[in-house]
Image: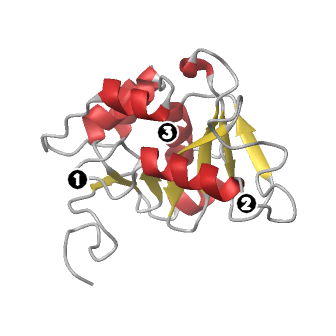
Amino acid sequence: MSIDRLIEVVKPPQAIGFVQDWATAESELGTALPQEYMRLVDIFGAGSFNDYLDLLTPPSQYGAGDIISTARELHELASVDWYGNPYDPYSIFPNPGGLLRWAESETEDEFYWLTNDKDPNKWPIVAREQGEEWHKFEVSTTRFILDTLSSTATAPFSRTAQRMGQPFFRPSSRTGDDFDWDGRLP
């Protein structure tokens, strides 16, 4: 599995007591989530790969990025007439086959699952740089992260992530925009 390879490449943080109530999270979203993503969050918790790719996780005291509130906010924004669909040719979850954001980047790149299959483990990754064209990747979440950190298979995203050198994960220690990743006031 890609998660095992990712753990070899990126050392997970020491246990931080990050426990998810996945049944509640999936109930609030109205869908099951990919198993590998849930395992990824259980192992790494909330935080950022290479200070670039920020995982969205269910709400917790450790997470700055909340997958549930982000899904709700994006659906609300997408329902406003913006002189066209900013997600074209896609729609936003919970619309059937809509995009469900699972990560974002420090450079405002967007990472989604295309929820086009009843089995969330088969959802491809759809991503784009801010306002640019969409890229579709037929890989799991952890495979996408691994490729972004260590190969060119996910270009243009890999170029930005790899500028940080050796792959690493920085856990999020506080919630809110007033704290940086180390939990200190700016």
Left or right, residue 128 beside residue 139: right
Left or right, residue 147 beside residue 176: right
Q: Circle 3: is it few (<14), some (14-19), or many (20+) Cα within 10 Å?
A: many
Q: Answer whether labels 2 and 3 touch (C-beta < 8 Å).
A: no
Residue at x 68% of width, y 65% of height? 130
Residue 174 in the image, given as x and y percentages of width and height: 22, 63
From the image, tell me which residue sits under label 2. 80
Looking at this rendering, what residue extends furthest in the bottom direction? 186
Q: Nearer the viewer, mark 1 or mark 3?
A: 1
Where does the C terminus fall, quadrant-wise? bottom left
Q: Answer whether labels 2 and 1 touch (C-beta < 8 Å).
A: no
Distance of label 2 from label 3 (alpha carbons) = 35 Å
Residue at x 58% of width, y 44% of height? 151
Q: Which mark is residue 146?
A: 3
Looking at numbered disc 1 in the image, what kind of residue is underneath it? Tyr
From the image, tell me which residue sits under label 1. 62
Q: Quadrant of residue 76?
A: bottom right
